[in-house]
Every structure is written in C-alpha cells, then in structure tokens.
Amino acid sequence: MNLRALRAALSICLVIICIPPMFPQKLEMFNYTSHGDYDLAVPKFDLMKPEGTQGIAVWKEDTYIHKLFNSVVKSVLPKKKRDMLHLNTAVLLAFTRRGEVINCKFLLNTDDRNILTEEELYKIYIKLKRIRINPYKVRIDPDPVAGGTSPDYAIISGPLISRTGRERIMLNSDKK
C-alpha cells in the first residue's frame, strides 16, 4: 500500500471516529423504579445516602415548605408544564439537623414521565441541593415508632405542582 493510500485511509478513519453519530444516544441520569401509578426516579450521579437515625420533620407553618419547593420548581418549569403535572408528582428531600440537603429523589406520576425531561429533573435537583432548610422553621424530632433520641436527618416531601394547581385539580375532581 502506498503512502498516499495509507494517508487517505487514516483520514477516513479519523473522520468516521470524530463525527458524532447521526442519532446520539441519550444517557439516562436517573434510575427509575415502578411503584404502580408512580415511578421513583433516583439520580445515578449522587451517591450520598443519609447516615444515622431518621427522624420526623416538624414545621409550624406549611407555607414555608410550599414556598421553598414552589420557588425552585417555578424557576425551572414553565407554568404550562407545571399545570400539566399530577397531584402525586413530588420530591423527596433528605436533610440534616443543620438544614443541609443530603439528597433528593422524585416521585413521578407515570403520566408525568412524558411531561418532565431528565434535564428539568436535574435542574430541580441541583437547585434543591443548593438550598438550606431553616432549622428554626423545620426541626427534626425523634420518630416515636423507630425510637431513638437524637435523629440525624429527616425526609420531607414537596410537590412539583403549585398550591393553586392542586386546588384547581381538587375543585375539578369535586365537580365530577
């Protein structure tokens, strides 16, 4: 094989290797587990697990939690998408006594998997990881069932649908 043919063959190989595929494969960022009418979406990229004893989150005013989740979701999802979500689509957020977020998982209505993209879930995840739960507004008490006196973390659930969206759905279901 002459030098010219070898160069041409190498050039073709480099072009083939360097050109991105026509149909790029989408890498999933979450593991999905089906639980009947909803799926649990757990981030593959976050290996943080709560350590120690789980307690119960107690807050005086539920508006704090709702505003917290609503502000994050509103900053990522447009109103049209938020209005399409179902009631049981939510975030499970684990946090420490100091208010640091350990991790979060998503409970998605099976129909909402077609509405929310992984990129949107990822953006919500990142924003939630950056917040801090105010320990003066949300405290962690021992779980009377599990026992223990000094819990290390708690898990709270926050809706991906706004309060007005929930009220609208409840009103529509009452009319039926």
Image (cartoon, rainbow, N blue to C red):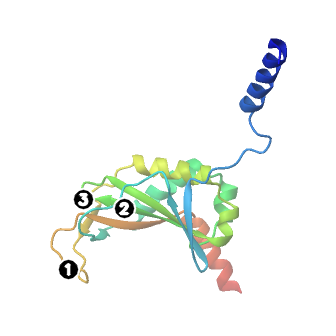
- Using the numbered discs, state the Cα–Cα distance from disc 3 to disc 1 in whole angstroms: 17 Å
Which residue is the site of mark 2?
Answer: 94
Quarter assignment of residue 3? top right
Q: Residue at x 25, y 54 (%)?
A: 98
Left or right, 65 with respect to 151, comes to right
Q: Residue at x 84, y 18 (%)?
A: 5
Q: Earlier in the sequence, mark 2 or mark 1?
A: 2
Q: Classify mark 2: residues with Cα within 10 Å, few (<14), some (14-19) or many (20+).
A: many
Secondary-structure class at tag 2 = strand
Left or right, 31 with respect to 1, comes to left
The quadrant of the picture occupied by the C terminus is bottom right
> What x and y, as percent, mark residue 37?
61, 78
Q: Residue furthest top?
A: 3
Q: Residue at x 23, y 65 (%)?
A: 52
Which residue is the site of mark 1?
Answer: 147
Query: What's under tag 3, amino acid-wise?
Result: Arg
- Using the numbered discs, state the Cα–Cα distance from disc 2 to disc 3 in whole angstroms: 10 Å
Q: Looking at the rendered structure, which numbered label has been put on residue 97? A: 3
- Using the numbered discs, state the Cα–Cα distance from disc 2 to disc 1 in whole angstroms: 19 Å
Query: What's under tag 2, amino acid-wise?
Result: Ala
Q: How many marks?
A: 3
Q: Earlier in the sequence, mark 3 or mark 1?
A: 3
Q: Residue at x 68, y 78 (%)?
A: 172
Q: Looking at the rendered structure, which numbered label has been put on residue 123? A: none
Task: Say which of marks 3 and 1 sits in front.
Answer: 1
Q: Classify mark 3: residues with Cα within 10 Å, few (<14), some (14-19) or many (20+).
A: many
